Image: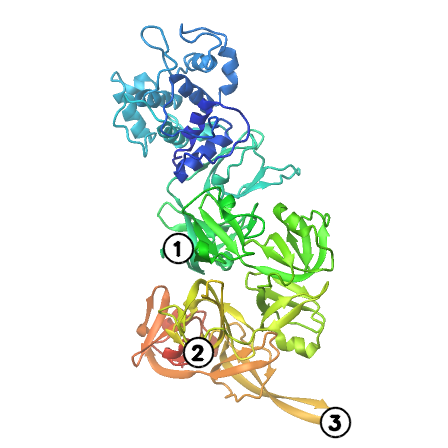
Amino acid sequence: MKKFTAAVMALVLLFALCISAGAKSASFPDITDPALLRDVAVLQMLGVVSGDDNGNFMPNGTLTRAAFCKMAVTVMGRGDEESIYRSRTIFPDVRAGYWAAGYINLAVSGDKKIILGNSDGTFRPDDPVTVAQAITILMRVLGYADADAGMLWPDGYITLAKDAGLLEGIGVSSPGSSMTRAQAAHLFANLLGTNVKGAGSYISTLGTATPDAVIMQLNVSAQDGSAGAVRTSDGILKTANGVLPPAILGLRGTLLKDSLGRLLTFLPESNRQQDVTVQTVDAGWLKDMSGATYTIPATAAAYTATEVTTYVKAFMDIAAGMHVTLYYSADGKIDGVYINTSKTESAVVVGSTGSVGALTGGDTGYTVIRNGAPASSSDIRPYDVATYDASAKILYVSDFRLSGCYENAWPSLSSPSKLTLMGHEFPVLPSAAATLAGYKLGQTITLLFTSDLQVAGAVTSGVSGSTAVGVVQSGATGSSASVKLFNGLVLSGDPSMADSAAAQLSGELVTVFSAGAGKISMSRMYSSGVAGSLDLTKKTVGAVALSPAVKVYERVGTGPVAQISLNDLVQTTISASKILYAGTDATSRVDTLLLDDVTGDRYTYGILKADTTTESSGGFDATNRTVSVTNSDNKTGTAAVVTGLAITNGAPGGVAFSADGAAVVNIVTLTAIKNVSRSAFYTRNDVTYLTVNGAEFPVAANVECYNSMGKTWFESLTDARAFSATLTVYYDRAAAEGGKIRMVIVE
């Protein structure tokens, strides 16, 4: 059982304050330690935590013996027995009617006494509880007795506590000193994870304990439709006390359920999870804002607000600036990740609906993330939308705006919770209702969005323009087209143009807006506002810096646009002639790049097959050249496509197809390097390389390997190297131009 940290004690401790029952916020203004705040949240879920009249926790305050008794009895799950002992008088200084009489009398009664009175027959309930007394009480809760500790007190109990793990992370230098509330929080927290004498963890004695569970989403609907449930990796659970502190979101640990299957509390794992803010991300790793890189296996579990998947399937949805929790296995390796996709509950439209200061509640020292990139408060512009993550102290700012025809609203125009624009239904934050109330269906408006694509406000079209940019999806016709925006949103509508014109836009980078219900207008982006080459060492285009959240796209000729990352570029400089478009954000940094055939990864590689096809039309026969590619995925060849480009039949090469695969955009013939020793390959940072004549080539991750003698395809480079001592390798372009080894042939 993993050790619980400061949570439980905090819970019991605040219970001693006993201001009131019921759901309370877990945010105490006088707690600056996130771990302590999470621990208090766990105890709050048990229904025994509250604050003082000012909502403070008072971590440096002390506890009375009476208060500590109440905490211990409550953690033992015997709080409902207190009324039975309330009318008794066991000690002359704890009369019936004293606020904690029932708890004190219960604690000193029965077979399992956890505390004793003083030698003079008194209890002294208002004296501060000492460190030694607190340790003794909780060791007795765990089933230990004086016979186990020996005659020397408190040393015997302190030694037992250290051996059991109760004092893990807690220094005990002055056993006779008064225990602080923060110390008590750590002690009670450790209690939950400590084993009972001769048995399992203490938390498992309080109900049904389910380890290795993740808190995925708070305040969801239960199966019976009731609100206030929690989505976990173990399913959706109702809560026993109706409390769901935000501090537990995204944590992994042990669920504690009662006999009805309701969630009593949640005990986070100790020292095996880490919160990071993302700078860049790829299929096998993640880099945080400090520059630290974390290796993440492709098969590692990935949790979001709504699903459990694998990292390799989820990483493309992780944007710069997102808050992510990493989970570690016992051997220190990352084995899971939580991606916070929970929806925003409140937002401010800068210069319109409120101030950023009101949103942050007076917090200072927070980080600003604008459109997924680190920024400063001075970068925030009018009509930007701000949201605040108080636990991570991050102010998220979005400038995403979408202009179009107001098509529908639900449940009403005066107070919509959902609205439709360009055929897409968007959720509306309650704070946006006032800005939407004056608009009518059919009117052209500009919607202002949070980073998680909720409507935070609206303005009349023309006051603030649309920032929606994306790629036209394949299959566009004159009456139906879809555009996938840079933020992943897909918008559809009727472009009202000729089929041929729509087809020419397929795969193009465009801006979008809507002039009428069901319509979509697309404008191709031609010009670039930035001149110069891309320097991957300096991270600049010309003299303009790249945004840390820059989105990079590539296409071959008129082929489809594909998103890539800067890490896909193996060369150090990309010439200006290869930059088709470079857009900048409000901070004048390059946030969008469209590159022309710089990686070579847009081609299908293999053995080229040249052929012809004859078609008859109007009484005439026309014979056209066709090309197809045979490789490990297409052993009988891809569909033959007509092309006017030159082809060498049987040559190793690559073909770049159009978005629909019906046309050839470009063909490359690969260059051979013969008699390469199988031992010449080497690996660096999980990438395989080959150096020939002083030029270093990376080997493509999907390199094709062919046995020309057996006319078969190897499953991997390893198989090809094992089969033959010498190989012929083929590259697509010079190493300095980003060339890679695309094929390996055993001859």
| Snapshot quadrant of residue 626 | bottom right
In terms of secondary structure, where does tag 2 sit? helix
Q: Quadrant of the C terminus?
A: bottom left
**Residue at the spot x=39%, y=24% of the render?**
142
Q: CA distance from mark 1 to mark 3?
A: 67 Å
| Image x and y of residue 439, in percent | 71, 54
Q: In this rendering, would 494 be left or right of 590?
A: right
Q: CA distance from mark 2 to mark 1?
A: 29 Å
Residue type, mark 2 in image: Ala
Eye-nearest disc, 2 or 3: 2
In terms of secondary structure, where does tag 3 sit? loop
Task: Please report whichever mark, 1 or 3, sits nearer to the chain's N-terminal start.
Answer: 1
Task: Please report whichever mark, 2 or 3, sits nearer to the chain's N-terminal start.
Answer: 2
Mark on residue 270? none
- Quick one: 166 or 392, which is closer to the camera? 392
Question: Which residue is identified by label 3?
Answer: 619
Give the class, few, some or many, for how many residues have Cα within 10 Å of label 3's Cα (few <14, many ≥20): few
Mark on residue 289? 1
Mark on residue 576? 2
